Amino acid sequence: MVQEYDDFVWTSRHDLAQRAHRGTPWEFYLNTMVQIETAEGGGVVRPFDESAGELHPPFGPLHVVTAIQPDPEPGSVSHARMRVLDRYLHTAGIRSMPAVGSSFAGDHSEAGDHSEDSRAVFGLTDDQARDLGVRFGQVAVFAWAGPHWSLLACAGDRQSDRGWRWEPSCFQ
């Protein structure tokens, strides 16, 4: 059976706005790196606080979204939510590719103990990406454009901008 959007309860806009103004989970999101792999190659984008970073994301400007909810759920439910997101993106004609957001380990050199399937999406404005995030129950989405790796609250105006560093995969 194919599950549809309305088969799920999504985190409300009100709850998303409240969560975006707390230290947690915002601090966790600030310490997230994102791995993107394609047939042509890929790598990991890592945020950092120094002002001088790279200027041109290798895939062009994009946003990173997920459908996995802020509160823990069984993996099968999270996978089903991601399939709903994938169908939505396909139907809406929004180009996307798989991505994985992971927490940092202590020295930021490798992935920590938490990761979430995500999608890198193309052609959206920040407001459109925020709206997509609200639709799929997200506290925040990432925006990657020019010199900025930004964390954008979906149900509010909170935003954190940082520099970024791209680390190509070893097999490129």
Image (cartoon, rainbow, N blue to C red):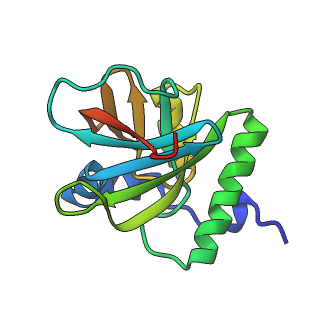
Query: Is 15 on the left-hand or right-hand side of 106?
Result: right
Which residue is most to the bottom? 74
Q: Position of residue 90 (x, y in %)?
A: 75, 41
Query: Could you say which quadrant of the image residue 150 lies in?
Result: top left
- 169, above or below 57, in the image: below
- Residue closest to the far front: 171
Q: Residue at x 53, y 31 (%)?
A: 128
Residue at 48% of width from left, 25% of height from top? 61
Nearest the eye: 98 or 1: 98
- Taking the spot 51% from the left edge, 76% from the top edge, the residue there is 73
How far across and how far down the image is residue 89, in percent?
69, 42
> Could you tell me which residue is drawn at 55 percent across and 45 percent down?
37
Q: Is residue 155 left or right of residue 164?
A: right
* Residue projecting furthest to the right: 1
Position of residue 77 measured from the top left corner of the image (x, y, whole percent): 62, 73
Q: Which picture quadrant has residue 49?
A: top left
Say if 129 sits above or below 139 in the image. Answer: above
What percent of the width, then of the height, locates residue 149?
A: 33, 33
Q: Quadrant of the N terminus?
A: bottom right
Number of callouts:
0
Q: Nearer the viewer, residue 110 or 22?
A: 110
* Location of residue 39 with respect to 111 vertically, above or below: above
